[in-house]
Image: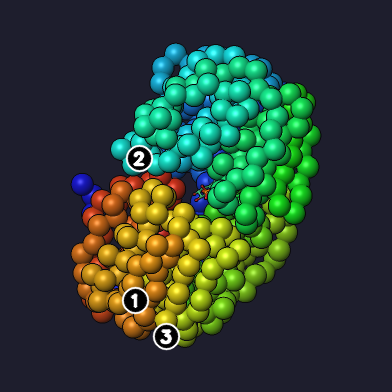
């Protein structure tokens, strides 16, 4: 199993860009495949999660060419997918399996979705339940809660679904099924989750309407291929934002980062902690706001995080906790129960790893309380197969008293294949 040791840095410096947004990359393949005509995608993230989605569509007869820079997808229209000849393996990717479950519910063929040992433990009823109400027939282990999932697609009816969780994966799965349903399908959620599906569906010409609390889609309207430019992933930039803040003497410019307001919770959190982060050169690409982020080392202080801010920063809590450990005072995170069902239980994993680095962390049901300590001890920790747990502790290692070793770092390739060389490139010693 791969492991990596990071040594403390005296500064983090440079001008970098981060790989394309994972959520937008998944959706570009999905909507490009279902549209009529050709879709081109620049800045596609070639991480393992997105390759799982790409391979799934190839296995359903979609022609997708990759010249190393641009992906070209020959869309087959809403009803042009073919029954796959084998089980579709979504690997570690929750977005692939949940969005595909919605999309496959509307196909007139049989399909089976599975994933790796981590994905097969994650909850699927949150999509299987509402899709069943629309008329889909889906079987899975544990009464439909766990993959593998077997889907007999067919005629669907629109529903008005009130999701109990703020989840873009749930919302998007239902909207994708809604493309095939009779009438209008609406989804509302307790707090707004990322809206990349809504933006991209509108961009492709789907009949979608967005409201304050959710979205509605009318079935049956064909979409048209588009030219998509994928912005840098703010969830990948987050590791370099925190590195730039916690290592004294740092200044780093991260160019071309997506700053969709449903994703910028990390910027709001770090600025509230006292971080010096500036947005420059703001622009719009393929319906998504983009900016360059300039970050300088700052003295951070503890804050309280909960409510609407949580879904806007849902993937960033492992690295927020590292920032909190290096801040002065206490940081309290609540309303973040969803972290327990991510790639791993991110509350338990983050707490265990920070404790190994000498930090006092109290786990709560829906979050954690981190007492800032200004430094991390040298330690050896495990990623538990979760890319963001691995990257968060490696960033912490730049501001530690001695080396930090993380085991099982192969998982970083799911979202950020060149993370380690980029971290070493910017770290000064
Ligand atoms: C994602 C949505 C989020 C996020 C995941 C990607 C997406 O999950 O954690 O990394 O692309 O829709 P939930 O919507 O389940 O919170």
* Residue occupied by mark 1: 399
Residue 69, image x, y percentages: 56, 39
Q: Give the quadrant of the C terminus.
A: bottom left
Q: State which mark lies toward you, 1 or 2.
A: 2
Q: Secondary structure at mark 3?
A: loop
Position of 257 with respect to 351 (left or right) is right
Query: In terms of depth relative to the viewer, which is nearer, 157 or 198?
Result: 157
Number of other residues with Cα within 10 Å of mark 3, as a class: few under 14, some 14 to 19, many 20 or more: some
Q: Mark 1: which secondary structure?
A: loop
Residue at 67% across, 69% down: 280
- Ligand 1 closer than 8 Å to label 2 CB: no
- Kindly indicate whether the residue at mark 2 contacts the one at mark 1 (C-beta within 8 angstroms): no
Q: CA distance from mark 1 to mark 3?
A: 17 Å
Of badges 1 and 3, nearer the viewer stands 3
Q: Is residue 124 above or below residue 139?
A: below
Name the residue rendered at 77%, 27% in the picture: 183
In 3D space, how far apart are the residues under numbered discs 3 and 2 (Cα atoms)?
36 Å
- Residue found 40% across the figure and 45% down from its top: 414
Q: Residue beneath label 2, please?
A: 121
Number of dots carrying numbers? 3
Q: Earlier in the sequence, mark 3 or mark 2?
A: 2
Report which residue position mark 3 lands on.
329
Q: Residue at x 20, y 47 (%)?
A: 1
Asked whether the residues under the numbered discs 1 and 3 touch, taking CB atoms below 8 Å apart as contact, a structural biologist would say no
Does 125 sit above or below residue 214? above
Is there a contact, CB below 8 Å, between mark 3 and mark 2?
A: no
Say few, some or many: other residues with alpha carbon within 10 Å of mark 1 (under 14 / 14 to 19 / 20 or more).
many
What's the image's color scheme?
rainbow
């Amino acid at each position: 199993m791969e492991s990596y040791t990071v040594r403390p840095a005296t500064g983090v410096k440079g001008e970098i860009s981060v790989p394309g947004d994972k959520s937008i990359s998944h959706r570009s393949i999905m909507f490009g495949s279902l549209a009529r005509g050709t879709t081109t995608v620049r800045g596609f993230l070639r991480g393992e999660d997105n390759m799982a989605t790409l391979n799934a569509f190839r296995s359903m007869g979609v022609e997708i060419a990759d010249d190393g820079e641009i992906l070209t997808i020959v869309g087959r229209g809403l009803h042009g997918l073919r029954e796959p000849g084998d089980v579709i393996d979504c690997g570690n990717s929750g977005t692939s399996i949940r969005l595909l479950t919605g999309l496959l519910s509307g196909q007139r063929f049989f399909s089976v979705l599975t994933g790796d040992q981590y994905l097969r433990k994650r909850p699927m009823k949150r999509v299987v339940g509402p899709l069943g109400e629309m008329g889909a027939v889906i079987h899975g282990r544990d009464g439909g809660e766990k993959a593998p999932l077997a889907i007999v697609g067919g005629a669907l009816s629109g529903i008005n679904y009130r999701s109990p969780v703020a989840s873009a994966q749930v919302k998007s799965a239902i909207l994708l099924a809604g493309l095939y349903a009779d009438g209008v399908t609406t989804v509302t959620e307790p707090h707004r989750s990322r809206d990349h599906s809504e933006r991209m569906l509108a961009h492709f010409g789907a009949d979608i309407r967005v409201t304050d609390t959710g979205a509605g889609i009318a079935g049956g309207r064909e979409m048209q291929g588009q030219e998509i430019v994928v912005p840098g992933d703010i969830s990948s930039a987050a590791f370099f934002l925190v590195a730039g803040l916690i290592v004294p003497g740092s200044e780093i410019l991260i160019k071309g980062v997506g700053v969709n307001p449903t994703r910028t919770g990390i910027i709001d959190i770090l600025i509230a902690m006292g971080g010096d982060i500036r947005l420059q050169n703001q622009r719009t690409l393929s319906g998504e706001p983009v900016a360059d982020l300039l970050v300088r080392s700052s003295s951070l202080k503890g804050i309280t995080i909960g409510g609407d801010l949580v879904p806007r920063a849902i993937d960033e809590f492992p690295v927020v906790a590292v920032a909190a450990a290096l801040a002065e005072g206490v940081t309290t995170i609540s309303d973040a129960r969803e972290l327990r069902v991510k790639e791993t239980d991110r509350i338990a994993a983050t707490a265990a790893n920070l404790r190994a680095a000498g930090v006092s962390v109290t786990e709560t049901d829906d979050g954690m309380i981190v007492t800032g300590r200004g430094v991390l001890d040298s330690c050896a920790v495990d990623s538990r197969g979760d890319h963001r747990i691995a990257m968060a502790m490696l960033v912490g290692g730049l501001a530690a008293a001695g080396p930090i070793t993380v085991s099982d770092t192969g998982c970083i390739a799911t979202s950020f294949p060149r993370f380690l060389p980029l971290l070493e490139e910017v770290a000064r010693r």
